[in-house]
Image: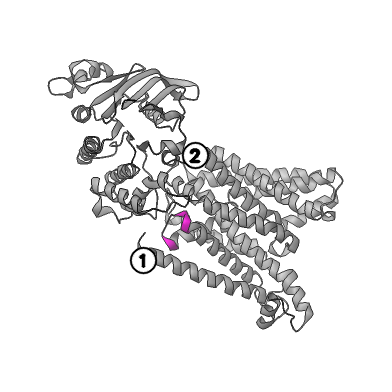
Amino acid sequence: MKQGKSNKTIYLIASLIIGTVLFFILDLFLGSVHIPIKNIIAILFGEIPEKESWSVIILESRLPKAIAAILCGAALSVSGLQMQTLFRNPLAGPYILGISSGAGLGVAIFIMGLSFLGVSVTGIGLPANSGMIISSILGSFGVLAILLSIINRLKDIMTVLILGIMIGSVITAIIGIIQYFSHDSQLKSFIMWTMGDLSSITNSQLTLLAPIVLIGLALAFISSKSLNAYLLGEEYATSLGVNIKKSRIIIIVITSVLTGSITAYCGPIGFIGIVIPHLARMISNSSDHKILIPLSILLGINVLLISDIISQLPGLEQSLPINSITSLIGIPFIIWIILKNKKITNLN
Amino acid sequence: MSKQINISSLAVGYDKKIILENINLVTETNKMIAVFGRNGQGKSTLLKTIAGLLPSIKGTFSYEGNDILNLSEKERSKLLSIVSTTQTDIGGITVKDFIAFGRFPYTNWLGINKEKDYQEIDKAIKLCKLEVLANRNYNELSDGEKQKVNIARAIAQNTPIIILDEPTVHLDLINKVEVFKLLKELVANHSKTVIISTHQIEYALQICDEIWLIHNNKVEALSPTEITNSNKLTEMFNDEIISFDKATQSFRLK
């Protein structure tokens, strides 16, 4: 690699890390109650602020939300990057192709299914939290497996979008049927989940989510060599010594774990997964996953923190749903991608 | 074990549908072998099978006594490299980085190239005379240039066998001849065994050491002279409109 290019990447990564710290603090700073920055930093370092209630606001509400934003941004971006490479399709992403809906179906079956056993989700702590993650991951995996079996036969990437919309609609229909047969209390827990966003996450959920996401991201980075080989297409990848069947399963397992676990607690968050990998490729001008994965993680974190900041800008009575913000940022970007290359054949 | 390539009772096809069976061929290594056959006769299926891209239905393909079809992808990638007709679209990568993909089987889990890898990459660039293009963007190249870069990638993979499926199909005359001459040089000076499927029968007859002729669901190994002196090519193109002229070693319209 040329010296200039790798230097540029280092600067880029450094500035994104600085951005992460700044936006993280800003995200903690903003909210309906004004807390001076000095006190926020004091609370983060375990000291006692001027008002004790500030400590609760930061530690129980704003900090979990900011950490959730970081985990979401990183996980969804890497998920999208892996899907774009695996499917060789620039419009692939966890939300648009219905992976998030699959996760929703998993959660619906879990919450409503429990009602048949006479157990209420709200009543049980850790088992419910882990059950939701597992069912959500399984739901994502199911949709990914279906997509993988069909997508290779579709030459036109626009057809893939339609397919994603169809899968999403079918799943919504199935969820509707499940809801119809559910008890009121179960229905309520599920509706609460569908409205979930970053702020609904609890500290105990975070202690489960954070390690899962970190392991997923580490595994994704370890797979970067085989992801690179996928860029040449499956035949060349095989000829270079990649066991396609095995690596394909590893990649979709990582993708389902990342998307599923995030969706389980934060609800479906759209478009980050498509947009961020493109941004990463554009600004690094590279297709090497050793660079793209860390870059997507950092860009995803920054964009999601910014989205969360926008959602609670001063002057707003209540915070806006994060999904609306990411859609408003994401959709124009996707339209721009489509217009830019009418015939999108490659990933750049 | 002698330096031989040995295909024995091989059957190839998709799923359960056999396209060619009972293929038995023995040949010395370090040769340039062309595979002839009309469209749909199974050239690609045969090459994909011996390259390990398609599972074989039956039989073996061994190189110096090792059955290549039974190796793992990783072991096979050090013995055999491929170049196919399909053009790869890949953005954000220089020609040199593309050729570096050839070192994939030898690098660590992160795919970092070492000194030895860079030597092999430079050697491949030199052999294919791609020095001028080395820092260009792969996607900006013409089809002919891309194909040469692809061959350079296979050379950097440093395998004793290189299999090429119609590598010259999109190329103009000069590029076609250059690719053939480059492959010949790999056989002559770098002790490679090159197996190439092609419709460029007239060039292949001049340049290859052996021909595998696929006709009527059979595969036969013949020398170029045997082919020219027989009526096999005219038979192969079993049409009223074309015949092979032995004297000029070329096809004639009837």
**Residue at the image position 44 percent from the left and 29 percent from the top:** B69
Measured as percent of width and height from the top left, residue A95 is found at 60, 52
Residue B254 seen in the current view: no
Position of residue A86 relative to residue A338, above or below, is: above
Q: Tell which residue pokes out farthest to the left in this image.
A: B247
Q: Which mark is residue A191?
A: none
Q: Quadrant of residue A117?
A: top right
Q: Chain of mark 1?
A: A
Nearer to me, A180 or A115 = A115
Disc 1 marks a residue whose amino acid type is Gly
The residue identified by callout 2 is: A243
Looking at the picture, tell me which residue is in the foreground, B33 or B201: B33
Q: Which stretch is magenta?
A: A283-291
Give the residue at the far front of this rendering: B1
Give residue A115's position: percent from left, percent from top: 84, 46
How far is disc 1 from disc 2 in space, using C-alphas?
Answer: 34 Å
- Vertical placement of B49 versus A62: above or below? above
Mark 2 residue element: loop
The residue type indicated by label 2 comes to Asn
Image quadrant occupied by the N terminus of chain B: top left
In the picture, residue B187 is in which quadrant? Answer: top left
Q: Quadrant of the C terminus of chain B?
A: top left
Find residue A4 and name its label: 1
Q: Is residue B24 visible?
A: yes
The structure residue drawn at horizontal position 21% and vertical position 23%, both measured from the top left corner, is: B224
Give residue A298's quadrant in the image: bottom right
Element at badge 1? Answer: helix
Residue drawn 78% across and 49% down? A111
Give coordinates of residue A214: x percent, y percent: 61, 57
Residue A185, image x and y in percent? 85, 52
Chain of the residue on which disc 2 is drawn: A
Q: Verify whether residue B208 appears in magenta.
A: no
